[in-house]
Image: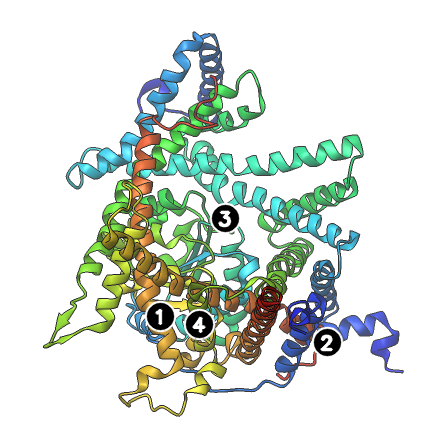
Amino acid sequence: MPSVLTSPHAALSWLGDGSLFRGVEVLVAAACTLGVYSILYRENTVFRFFEHFYVGLAMGYMIFVAWAQVLEPKWWTPMVHEMKWTWALALPAGLLFYLIYSKRYVWMSRLIIMTSLGVASGMVFYSLANAVMPQVWAAVDRPIWSKGAVQVSNLISAVTLLTVLVYFFFSFEQKSRAVRGAAVTGRWLMMVAFGAMFGATVMARMSLLIGRLQFLLGDLLKVLPK
Amino acid sequence: MFERLQRIDRRAVYIVLFLLMVALLKWPLRLPMVVSSDARGFYEAVERTDPSKLVLVAADWDAGTMAENGTQTEAVLRHLMRLHRRFAIMGFAWPAGPELTDGIARRLAPEYDYEYGRDWVNFGFKPVLSISLMTLVKDIPGFYKKDAKNTPVAELPALEGVRDIHDVSLIAQFTSAATLGSYIAFVWGPFKTPIVHGCTAVIGPQQYPYLDARQIEGLLMGVRGSAEYEALIGRPGGGTEMMPAQSFAHLLIIVLIIVGNIGYLGARGWRQRKAGGAEGA
Amino acid sequence: MRGWLAPHGRGHLWALIVGAWVLSVGVFFLLQVMPPRWRRPMIMLFTFLGGCFYSVEFFLPPNNFLTSYKEGFGNAWVVMGSFAMPLGVLNLSLVHVKKIATRSGSWGGSIVYFTAMAAMVTFCFWQQYWPKSKAGGQGFELLFQYAYMPLGATMFSILAFYIVSAAYRAFRISTAEAGLMAAAAFVVMLGQVPLGMWLTHGIPVESRWAGLRVEQIAHWILAGINMAAVRGVLFGAAVGSLAMALRIWLSLERGAYFDQKV
């Protein structure tokens, strides 16, 4: 009988292409993958284990990143090593977020949360000017008549844009037949867009599955052609 | 019969899907791929990058979309390494994105004689996307101060001569979330820094307005984008390997939708005929 | 900074830092003894001032007096954002602590959660601050590349089975609009993959009929009709976001959180 089947050492070495630790890594990854896929049969304890395991790993990594990649270089180092002691005020301000857990002091958490929302709101003008206005220019920059002929694609795009805008216009009742007709046309054209989105979504979901199958068949079972 | 066509057991469907994918991964049916203008635009934007400037690789994706964003990132990093472009990895949407991208770079580095610190750096994750972008464009080393491994930026040769966004020739953003708008608002808008975008297919259709308005130079949509880019760089990889299975997965879904609707329309027609016959009687 | 506000040595630095924290505690108590009727106006004032910075800086001519403060202001809010990051972790952890304390439901899963979190934090910091340690590096690689990454990828890949099942059971072409949607979906699905491209590969790329190739039709749907429809939605969303931003900035927004008693 091949030693791969009888000796764990040989099996791990085979899995890891000669490296024992890499064999352990592949085995762990395979266990995680198959454990999560067990939900497809039915709800079970193995899936629950891996679910909690995943969330725990994600939370642990987030804690590490929050300190090592943000707070340490951008707050602690300037405060302690670059002598910029005013950064000390960031700690009490940041800790205000955690007062949401206190019934008595919860209103103070609103100070920092609402200030954050205010700061974010103040940036909307940048988005409008730099991201949305060029869209308006791009929309009108598609000539419907050019070189002595109707540009069908541009005409369809213009009609789609206008009818979709009419469809979503709820400020007044759509009474006239022209407006209702435009809204119905917009709905039909949006169906085409939604179909395209559905098609793209299918591609996305399938590729995620194929990616995992590549791992199981390639790295674990080693049956895929190189 | 029509009712049964609508009620095939979902586990049977899963098994058919699973077996089809396994078969096509094991015995791939390779068909030629036509490269779209969107992917070509991405490729040409990378080709046009200035060798003396930095390329920013924005890793705004997580492990869940490894198959799409991971394969796109690998193809583009290969291209950058082949062109000997310095690049810096950064991320603002998912904490794990920069580390996953750095893992891909480390795996490819020996093939192209790339060395961390000399040829590329990993800035790691920073929160608050919009504010981070607005701040780093003015002073990149000042914003980051250290890389993800705690090395001061002054000690990283890859960042020599890099001060602000004007020293960046391209931003290649890979994402699974709707983050492109912020890059366009706070980087492209004021500074017209070229941006190319690799995204999951789920959000792909929503990025076309930006492509049409030339706010992004190119677009890679899902694993199709990866396969197209691999064809352009002449190096088949994960994306290309997935396409045979992907093709038949789409075909299976189309067949299942048609089968389900034959059952639905057939049953509906049968019920209407039955009701009409009963009324007549 | 001048005089005693400029730190001379580490002792002075820490005195200033601790002094700032003590001052903050004082401000905290002052805020608490403040008359409650002042709280809402104070929150409204902070919200307004917070929004003022970037909006005023935007409307003033370029390189105005606020532009030089953008970097410091931005860095401060990035730090604020990272202080807020552990909020989610804390919230989830409190839920699991309660489960363990009351031995309710799947409290064993809660133990797994904390064990995984502790292991990840340990190995992350170990490999970060002791980079020469092989054990730290290997442990981090095992947990990140071979546990976290496969788990995340697999969780999302389950959706593939669900979308197949959902498409088969729920996609019913009961109206002409649904039929149009299905047709567009089929064309886009086929146009994205080599199998679909093969169906019309007989039409030469240079010919006048090249537009009938399935990948060309799919691209036209995506870059033509879909693009215009999404642009229309984008315009509506932009107007909505402007309205929402102004409502928040000027504290006009009402709702469950905004109407809470302070």
Q: Are marks 1 and 4 in contact (CB under 8 Å)?
A: no
Task: Classify mark 4: helix, strand or loop.
Answer: helix
Q: Left or right of C138: which side holds A125?
A: left
- For mark 1, what is the residue? C221
Task: Classify mark 1: helix, strand or loop.
Answer: helix
Q: Chain of mark 3?
A: B
- For mark 2, what is the residue? A221
Of residues C20 and B132, the one drawn nearer to the viewer in this rendering: B132
Of residues C23 and B275, the one drawn nearer to the viewer in this rendering: B275
> Distance of mark 4 from mark 3, alpha carbons?
53 Å
- For mark 4, what is the residue? C183
Q: Is residue C245 above or below residue C22?
A: below
Between disc 4 and disc 3, the foreground one is 4
Q: Are marks 1 and 3 on the same chain?
A: no
- For mark 3, what is the residue? B150
Task: Classify mark 2: helix, strand or loop.
Answer: loop
Q: Is residue C203 above or below residue C122?
A: below
Please, what is the three-letter code of the amino acid marked with disc 2?
Leu
Please, what is the three-letter code of the amino acid marked with disc 1?
Ile
Q: Chain of mark 4?
A: C
Query: Tag 4: Cα neighbours inside 10 Å, few (<14), some, or many (≥20)?
Result: some
User: Dividing the image into 4 quarters, which one contains the C terminus of chain A?
Assistant: bottom right
Between disc 1 and disc 4, the foreground one is 4
> Distance of mark 3 from mark 2, alpha carbons?
39 Å
